[in-house]
Amino acid sequence: MVDVEKILLGFWLTEKSNFLTSSKNQYVFHVAIHATREQVRQAVCREFGVSPVHVNVLRQKGKVRRMRVTRRHAVAIRGVCAKKAFVTLRADDKIEIN
């Protein structure tokens, strides 16, 4: 059983994701780090009532920032990692983004 609230964290809204939605009927979601491709597919089916054709998942590493501790020493700190899912739907299926 897939818990949708723990898998799908929200839409990934950028200029590129809006372009993909309008041109290729592809939606981009922010998903949990531990989520698999099949879990994302099941969560989208359960939440929106559509069946995805393809689901591509990628991990995005956090940005590395350097912080100066003293005049001679610096520490590298990595930001929060994220995971995105690109979900492709059939031409007649749509998801309403509020």
Image (spheres, grey):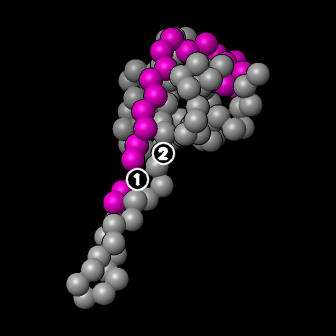
The residue indicated by pointer 2 is 82
Q: Judge left or right: residue 72 versus residue 75.
A: left
Q: Residues within 10 Å of mark 2 (few under 14, many from 20)?
A: some
Picture coordinates of residue 24 (x, y %)? Answer: 40, 21
| Residue designated by label 1 | 62
The quadrant holding residue 75 is bottom left
Instruction: Inspect the magenta stretch and tell me whether residue 47 lies in it.
Output: yes
Above-or-below relation of 12 to 70 = above
Q: Amino acid at mark 2?
A: Ala
Question: Percent from the top left, x then y, of residue 3?
Answer: 74, 31
Q: CA distance from mark 2 to mark 1?
A: 7 Å
Asked if residue 25 can be seen in this view, the reply is yes
Classify mark 1: helix, strand or loop: loop
**Disc 2 secondary structure class:** strand
Left or right placement of residue 8 versus residue 70 in this view: right
Image quarter hosting the N terminus: top right
Report if residue 18 is visible in the image: no
Q: Residue furthest front?
A: 73
Query: Residue, x 49% and y 39% (percent of image)?
Result: 83
**Is residue 77 or residue 11 the one in the foreground?**
77
Q: Is residue 95 above or below residue 18?
A: above
Q: Residue at x 51, y 11 (%)?
A: 53
Say if mark 2 contacts mark 1, CB within 8 Å: yes
Q: In the image shown, does 96 or 78 lie closer to the viewer? A: 78
Q: Per the image, is 74 magenta? A: no
Tell me what residue is drawn at x 58 percent, y 35 percent: 34
Residue type for callout 1: Gly
The quadrant the C terminus occupies is: top right
Q: Which residues are magenta?
A: 43-64
Which picture quadrant has residue 45? top right
- Residue at 38% across, 33% down: 19
